[in-house]
Image (tube, rainbow, N blue to C red):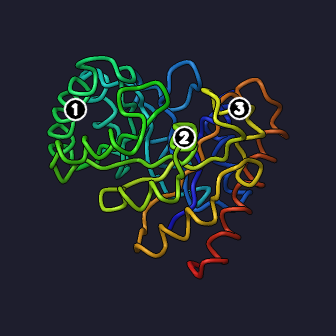
């Protein structure tokens, strides 16, 4: 497994700051944030001019480009993201599931949209991943399994985020086992309680919440998962650099300890 973090944690700072701080914290790689409003990192309208600089940062700080997150399913927006990913050698693009929980027709609409985007991903040689998300059409294990059954493209996979599954009222360790066959990316963070939002950024740091992340990582190891495990902490855009660094370092230490505890490192 490769330990990374989404640059959105450092959304209030420039992209080089994210690379530098994550390298200092000991991460193996980085997930590039293309999330409008949360960062100004991989700005898709300017991806061609940004690509050379990102490649240089990756080499300078010895951080592998593990994934890219672009939440919209808009085909034009997604094609920009896939073009950027292909040029950068980024293997995975994470997007949002869209739709609304238990709204008639919403799940099928998401499946149709994601299926079309998976075909686009095949063209660009990347893997499109989606995760269950609180409030969306795909929000728990049963809806995730429906998507897995409906979309058979080899360029489609599941991005498994334990915090959303936890807030859906499930046990993330058990849920992971049910979908592991199609998991191609992991977003990881902790969570206190089962409320709608993930909580304060510091409470999203691994080890500060209620989720059995050791058990979660053990399941990944036992099933031979060798992809990215990327910390995704949102809401820290106004945080001081010190606070962001503490969250990054604390979470990486917890992940490393989990890997060691289950014999994965």
Label 3's element?
Answer: loop
Whole-percent x and y of residue 216?
55, 62
Q: Which residue matches tag 2? A: 169
Q: Earlier in the sequence, mark 2 or mark 1?
A: 1
- In the displayed structure image, the side of residue 219 where residue 80 appears, left or right: left
Q: Quadrant of residue 238?
A: top right
Distance Cα–Cα, label 3 vs label 1: 29 Å
Q: Is residue 221 above or below residue 183?
A: below
* Residue 73 in sight from this viewpoint: yes
Which image quadrant: the C terminus?
A: bottom right
- Crowdedness near tag 2: few (<14), some (14–19) or many (≥20) residues, C-alpha within 10 Å: few
Q: Which residue matches tag 1? A: 111
| Residue pictured at 52% horizontal, 46% vertical | 170
Whole-percent x and y of residue 186?
47, 53
Q: Quadrant of residue 227?
A: bottom left
In front of the other: label 2 or label 1?
Answer: 2
| Residue pictured at 42% horizontal, 28% vertical | 71
Seen as rendered, the residue at the extreme bottom is 263
Distance Cα–Cα, label 2 vs label 3: 16 Å
Q: Earlier in the sequence, mark 3 or mark 1?
A: 1
Whole-percent x and y of residue 159?
41, 47
| Residue pictured at 64% horizontal, 65% vertical | 214
Label 2's element?
Answer: loop
Q: Nearer the viewer, residue 43 or 238?
A: 238
- In the displayed structure image, the side of residue 19 where residue 30 appears, left or right: left
Q: Earlier in the sequence, mark 2 or mark 3?
A: 2
Mark on residue 199?
3
Label 1's element?
Answer: helix
- In the displayed structure image, the side of residue 155 where residue 209 appears, left or right: right
């Amino acid at each position: 497994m490769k330990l990374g973090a989404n640059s959105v944690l450092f959304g209030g700072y420039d992209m080089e700051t994210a690379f530098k701080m994550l390298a200092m914290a000991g991460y193996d790689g980085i997930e590039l944030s293309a999330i409008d409003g949360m960062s100004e990192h991989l700005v898709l309208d300017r991806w061609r001019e940004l690509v050379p600089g990102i490649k240089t940062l990756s080499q300078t700080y010895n951080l592998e480009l593990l994934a890219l997150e672009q939440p919209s399913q808009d085909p034009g927006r997604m094609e920009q993201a896939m073009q950027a990913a292909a040029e950068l050698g980024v293997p995975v693009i994470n997007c949002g599931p869209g739709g609304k929980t238990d709204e008639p027709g919403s799940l099928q609409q998401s499946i149709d949209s994601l299926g079309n985007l998976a075909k686009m991903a095949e063209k660009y040689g990347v893997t499109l991943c989606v995760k269950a998300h609180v409030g969306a059409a795909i929000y728990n294990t049963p809806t995730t399994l429906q998507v897995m059954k409906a979309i058979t493209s080899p360029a489609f996979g599941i991005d498994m985020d334990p915090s959303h599954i936890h807030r859906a009222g499930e046990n993330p360790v058990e849920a992971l086992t049910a979908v592991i066959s199609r998991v191609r990316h992991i977003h990881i963070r902790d969570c206190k309680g089962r409320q709608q939002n993930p909580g304060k950024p510091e409470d999203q740091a691994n080890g500060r919440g209620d989720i059995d992340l050791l058990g979660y990582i053990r399941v990944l190891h036992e099933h031979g998962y060798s992809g990215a495990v990327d910390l995704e902490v949102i809401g820290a855009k106004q945080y001081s650099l010190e606070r962001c660094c503490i969250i990054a370092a604390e979470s990486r230490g917890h992940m490393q300890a989990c890997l060691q505890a289950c014999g994965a490192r």
